[in-house]
Image: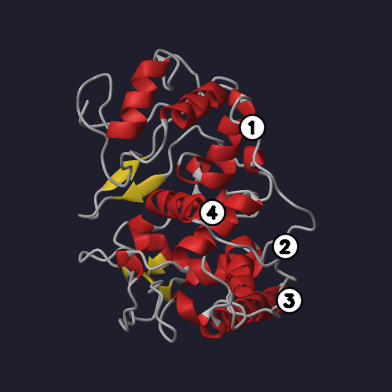
Amino acid sequence: MKKALKIVGYLLGTVALLLAIGAAYIHFSGIPTYEVNLPDYPQFKADSTMIAEGKRLATMVCNQCHQAPGGKLEGKYMADLPAMFGKAWAPNITGHAVFGSGRYSNAELAYLLRTGVKRDGKYAPPWMPKFPHLSDYDLQSIIAFLRSDEPELTPSDVVQPTTQPSFLTKFLCKVAFKPLPYPEKAIEAPPIADQVAFGKYLVTAKVDCYGCHSQSFETINIMEPEKTPGYLGGGNPMPDLEGNIVVTRNLTPDKETGLGNWTEEQFVLALKTGIRPSGPALRYPMFPYAALTDEEAKAIWAYLQTVPAIVNKVERPEE
């Protein structure tokens, strides 16, 4: 009996040692680095329309993290990053040739935004959105905007502190979050006349609503968004600027816990202005998408009517 217990003890000790070695490796090796395989990115001529669209898109998906209090896109502390991921500062993306996006070529920018891999091979952590489904035109519009002389992109030499990823972030980047494949063929957005298809494009590719409004950032399926657990059912805990936890809203058409009793008019008003049917404004980290057109907001609504209803009552203390 004593011999058996001794063997079990040795086995448990070995397992504990292996786990400790594995944990140490994850902790000290940090977020992985990958080989950079830049695409043969086509030359394109940016006009004022393309730059304006890139700027509009930036106000919806870039500025919230990268815009400093002074207005420039020189980065800032990401106060709304869930604590389980560590601490992060969004980097400077002004046109500075050394410290901003000016050091990236068009191909390097496209590769980063599509795959999540930076020009030096480092993987952009999970909180940096990736855009594998964004249309080529919209991607080019973002790049055109970053190359423009818009005031918020005036070169700045501000360097943000080094990100401090948690052990969970390092672990997830080893086993779950990997570089995405660069598209092998052209990507076009659906025509706006096809409301449902265009709304899906906005939700899953351009504005990326599903990332916050699904079950958890840990289980997002970037390549197949609709297979994300709790897709658009809300419940993802996110901190506001004071560190208070706000649980994201259920956007499915469930009548009891989702948007099933809302009207299109109410949804468009809330999405663009932050005013809900019950009166109080939406709370940070949700912010009004004033840059969306009415047609885009209505397309999102049309698509949301087609997703499976999920029963998920989200507590909202202010109601």
What's the residue at 50%, 47% (across, down)? 216
Q: Which residue corresponds to mark 2?
A: 182
Q: Is residue 119 left or right of residue 207?
A: right
Image height of 159 relative to 308, above or below: below
Compared with 172, 243 (above or below) is above
Q: State the residue position of label 4.
A: 218
- Amino acid beneath label 1: Pro
Q: Which residue is labeled 3 in the image?
A: 37
Measure the alpha-carbon separation of dots 2 and 3: 9 Å
Q: Position of residue 83 (x, y in %)?
A: 36, 61
Give the CA separation, mark 1 to mark 4. 32 Å
Camera-near label (2 vs 4) is 2
Q: Which residue corresponds to mark 1?
A: 191
Report the Cα–Cα distance between label 3 and label 1.
31 Å
N-term-proximal mark, 1 vs 4: 1
State which tag comes first along the sequence, 2 or 4. Answer: 2
- Identify the amino acid type marked 4: Glu
Whole-angstrom CA distance, mark 4 to mark 3, is 27 Å
Question: What residue appears at the point 32 percent right and 73 percent down from the top-left corner?
Answer: 154
Considering the numbered disc 4 on the image, is that residue within a helix, a strand or a loop? Answer: helix
Q: Which of the marked residues, 3 or 1, is nearer the chain's N terminus?
A: 3
Residue 25 horizontal/vertical position (percent): 59, 83
When asked about the image quadrant of residue 175, the answer is: bottom right
Q: Please say whether residue 282 is visible from this viewpoint.
A: yes
Circle 3 SS class: loop
